[in-house]
Image (cartoon, grey):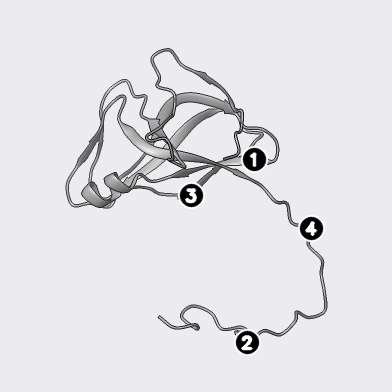
Amino acid sequence: MEELVVEITKKEGANLPLYGTELSSGMDLFAFVNEPVILRPMERALIPTGIYMGIPEGYEAEIRPRSGLAFKFGITVLNTPGTIDSDYRGEIKVLLINLGNEPFVVNNGDRIAQIIFKSIVRANLHVVASLPETSRGQGGFGSTGI
């Protein structure tokens, strides 16, 4: 497995992201809130984590939902995956939404999302007169079957 060094700072009392198991691909992110945040059904909130990262050039971080929160409570990341670019130096925050039927409380220190680091490939676009034909052609949503 490739290892990436990411510099990080945090507010006093904030939890550092952690891998849940030895082979986890994502690190858990923790809420850093002064008081509980109540998310009513269909409400969204930007939840701070209290951490700041220096992601190396050529990489990004993606913020993704935690499957347990999504399955058990309907809590997910609204702009999933959220992208953190290597030139961003602000606090990492997570945009949560409650798609469940009951209010959900986010407490300080709760695991709210996961962060995954990925390498970036930059596209060099070339304008051409036409594209090569394929068997699918311009078939869109559902064109290859259900």
Residue 140 position, x and y percent, is: 53, 79
Dot placed on the residue nearer the N-terminal end, 1 or 2: 1
Q: Is residue 91 left or right of residue 24?
A: right
How far apart in space, not on screen, are marks 2 and 4 (Cα)? 25 Å
Task: State the residue at coordinates (60%, 41%).
Answer: 60
- The residue that disc 4 covers is 124
The amino acid marked with disc number 1 is Tyr
- The residue that disc 3 covers is 81
The amino acid marked with disc number 2 is Ser
How far apart in space, not on screen, are marks 4 and 3 (Cα)? 23 Å
Residue 90 position, x and y percent, is: 56, 28
How far apart in space, not on screen, are marks 2 and 3 (Cα)? 30 Å
User: Is the residue 5 above or below the residue 41 in the image?
Assistant: above
* Disc 4 element: loop
Dot placed on the residue nearer the N-terminal end, 2 or 4: 4
- The residue that disc 2 covers is 135
How far apart in space, not on screen, are marks 3 and 1 (Cα)? 15 Å
User: Is the residue 43 above or below the residue 141 in the image?
Assistant: above
Dot placed on the residue nearer the N-terminal end, 4 or 3: 3
Q: Quadrant of residue 108?
A: top left
Task: State the residue at coordinates (27%, 52%).
Answer: 99
**How many C-alpha atoms fall within 10 Å of the one at disc 2: few (<14), some, or many (≥20)?**
few
